[in-house]
Image: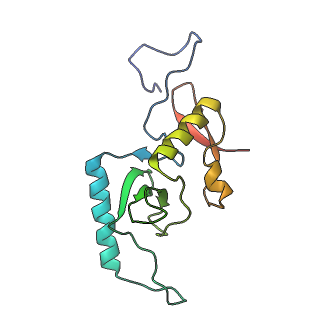
Amino acid sequence: MARGGPAGGGGGGGGAPPPARPHYWIPGAFAPVDLDEALETREIWLLVAEQEGLTFDANGEPEPRFLPEFMPIAMSPGGDGLIVDLRPGGSHGAVFLWNHERWGLGLPMWDSIGSMLRDVAVALETQTPVLLQHAALGGAEATCVGRVDDLGDLTWEAAR
């Protein structure tokens, strides 16, 4: 089954593989969203948080919920998102994983969008793991290495 590219083109003849397609280039199979999709996702998650109401854990602490100060910037096919925390304080501007089933923030995956872009670019250019700082701080997301196949598909594989 043919994938990508013009009919009858590509394939064969050695040379460099085609450039990576940009669909899900952020580790964890995340694709950037445009402003309309980011705002729509944000509104949906805020509505869900409002409908669920404030809940408390076994210790009487409020359960995590999506806040108006969170802005989605990328989505995975499974419905999870990368969000930027826009609240004042130490995590302002940090990029977090927002798991649509577990809700709540862990440790930041990156300190900023700029650090995310640098981390991904360096990892792809040097074939070194991404998310090393996150892992060093005890973050739950595994380090991984990006690989581009002959069809230009980028996948992230667990670092060894």
Q: Quarter-wise, where is residue 23 in the image?
A: top left
Residue at (46, 24) in percent of width and height: 2
Residue at (47, 56) in percent of width and height: 94
- Who is closer to the viewer here, 37 or 4? 37
Q: Is residue 24 left or right of residue 36?
A: right
For the rendered model, the colour scheme is: rainbow
Quarter the C terminus occupies: top right
Residue at (56, 42) in percent of width and height: 119
- Who is closer to the viewer here, 28 or 109? 109
In the picture as drawn, the residue positioned furthest to the right comes out as: 160
In the picture as drawn, the residue positioned furthest to the top comes out as: 13
Q: Is residue 14 left or right of residue 51?
A: right
Is residue 155 among the parts visible in the rendering? yes
Where residue 144 appears, as percent x and y from the top left, is 63, 45
Q: Is residue 110 above or below residue 122?
A: below
Where residue 102 appears, as percent x and y from the top left, is 49, 69
Where residue 90 appears, as percent x and y from the top left, is 49, 64
Where residue 81 appears, as percent x and y from the top left, is 43, 56
Residue at (57, 29) in percent of width and height: 149
Is residue 26 among the parts visible in the rendering? no
Q: How many marks?
A: 0
Q: Is residue 20 above or below residue 90?
A: above
Q: Quarter-wise, where is residue 128 in the image?
A: top right
In the picture as drawn, the residue positioned furthest to the front comes out as: 89
